[in-house]
Image: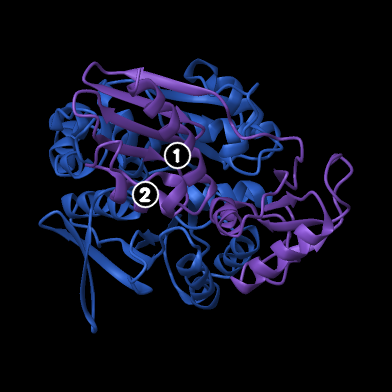
Chain colours: A purple, B blue
Amino acid sequence: MKKTTATAAKTAKDRGILVFENTSEVIRAENLLKQHDRSIRVMGPPPEIRTGCDLVIAFPLIEGLEILRLLEAENISPLQVVPVTGPLLEPVNIFFTTDYGQFLMVQAANMKITVDQTSLRVVNVSGGGCPDVPYLAAEMVGKRLDEAPSPRSIGHTLCGYALQLAYEEIVRKCSR
Amino acid sequence: MFAVVGTVPDKNFPLRSGPVCLSGGKLIMGDRRGDLRVPVNRGTPALLASAFQVCQFFDAPPPTAYLVGDIGTGTGSRSLYAYLEEKIAGECFTSLTFHYIQPDVDWHNRVLFAAAQMAEPPVLIADAGFMYAAKMSGQAGAYEIFTPDIGELAFLADADAPHPFYTRGFIFHEPERAPELVSQAFKHDNAARYLLVKGKTDIVADATGVTDSVTEPVVSAMEAIGGTGDIITGLLAAFTALGHDSRRACIYASTVARMAGALAVPDPGSPVVDIIRHIPRGLEQFFSKNNADK
């Protein structure tokens, strides 16, 4: 094991950055997220960030889906949401599709969703590693695509976000 | 004795630790406060149910579970991390398997440090969210085995990605490129001593590259079924606890999972518990066909 201590400084590797148009948006977002007990910090932007104001909000990247939902409910829209480790990184945008005949599976990043093409029911959700994945599966499996809650509406994490992308893709494919 | 750490998708499920068993398709966790029954759909309950099947088959002690309810808010996970930081150093397990838990690098480091204080440091296996945190922490080398799928292998191979969601597009997670991704993961110190990559072909790899591939039996529907990766990790945890070396445990876990899958004859809509039910027969077939060392 590499040297570590129980009191290791809070690492930035699992943080994300919310970039806003202006400082007043930053302050509104900061107040809102603190009211919801989110572990956030206002800081200066990294040099790779060329847009927005000179303040950004660092947040636990894994909680991105829930944080965006909180902001959206108050009509606060960040210009960008990026990881601290790589502000130029973008969400995965490659989908893999497997057609089993009766069933269709779409994978986005580490998440897969499978639908019965006859009934359009979600029959399985697999992959992922965050705790909302089993929860999302429990809420979605067995329901028709147009009845099932979207991962965006009830998920909390980046795995939930990846499932949302796979869900949108499979809805698109099934509506053709 | 081995332990598994993870979550249950029920925000009201309390933090509990103790041995588990499988009965009537439910995972049972009992203590003086009464029994808790957990459906075995996917995730950590599926892992524990699979591990239990191996223990029962070999008449070995059941797995000890550290479980808490968490639906993705991280609240339950943080309480479990804190509990482990306080308690784990005083425990005695041959292996510790970490599974679905909210990835948090700081908490990961605290728990890893506490585990290193155990009188006999256990074999560490990480899958799912805890594996993400292990990679991000830069402490992957402290682990004996990671069990990624091909998408997660691409994440381990990408030095910059903080989560599989941000794996860069030019690092294609295509099965045929798995050896290259394995090499990158080790190059960037983002791999455990062994990787068991779960997919159409299951791959066992170490720092020298791919050492073993498991392709048979082919049960193509298993890829779509939520929880099949959890079966493999559960079998792996149990085989490791039974004393098999890591490489052999990986091969056994992969093959027995496939055999149980073939016996279940699933379709992509089947629930994972249908496959878990067939693990005892899969074990029977595997050890008789291969005359393998139990």
Which comes sooner in the sequence, label 1 or label 2?
Answer: 2
Secondary-structure class at tag 2: helix
Secondary-structure class at tag 1: helix
Q: Residue A150: percent from the left, percent from the top?
A: 40, 44
Q: Name the residue under label 2.
A: A136
The chain carrying label 1 is A
Q: Which residue is drawn at 63% across and 52% down?
A: A61
Q: Name the residue under label 1.
A: A163
Position of residue A107 in the picture relative to residue B219 (left or right): right
Q: Toward the viewer: A116 or A107?
A: A116
> Crowding at label 2, few (<14), some or many (≥20) Cα neighbours within 10 Å?
many
Task: Give the CA distance from mark 1 to mark 2.
Answer: 9 Å
Question: Tag 2: residue type?
Answer: Leu
Point out the image quarter for the N terminus of chain A. Answer: bottom right
Q: Toward the viewer: B161 or A45?
A: A45
Q: Can residue A134 be seen in this view?
A: yes
Residue placed furthest toward the bottom = B32
Q: Residue A115: percent from the left, percent from the top?
A: 28, 30
Q: In this view, does A126 lie above or below B40?
A: above
Q: Can residue B127 be seen in this view?
A: no
> Crowding at label 1, few (<14), some or many (≥20) Cα neighbours within 10 Å?
many
Q: Residue B224 carries which label?
A: none
Residue placed furthest toward the front = A75
Q: Residue at x 72, y 51 (%)?
A: A18
The image quarter containing residue B208 is top right
Position of residue A110 in the picture relative to residue A174 (left or right): right
Q: Which residue is drawn at 52% across and 38% down?
A: B194
The image quarter containing residue A113 is top left
Q: Residue at x 76, y 40 (%)?
A: A87
Q: Is residue B26 above or below residue A141?
A: below
Q: In this view, does B160 lie above or below A27?
A: above
Q: Toward the viewer: A64 or A10?
A: A64
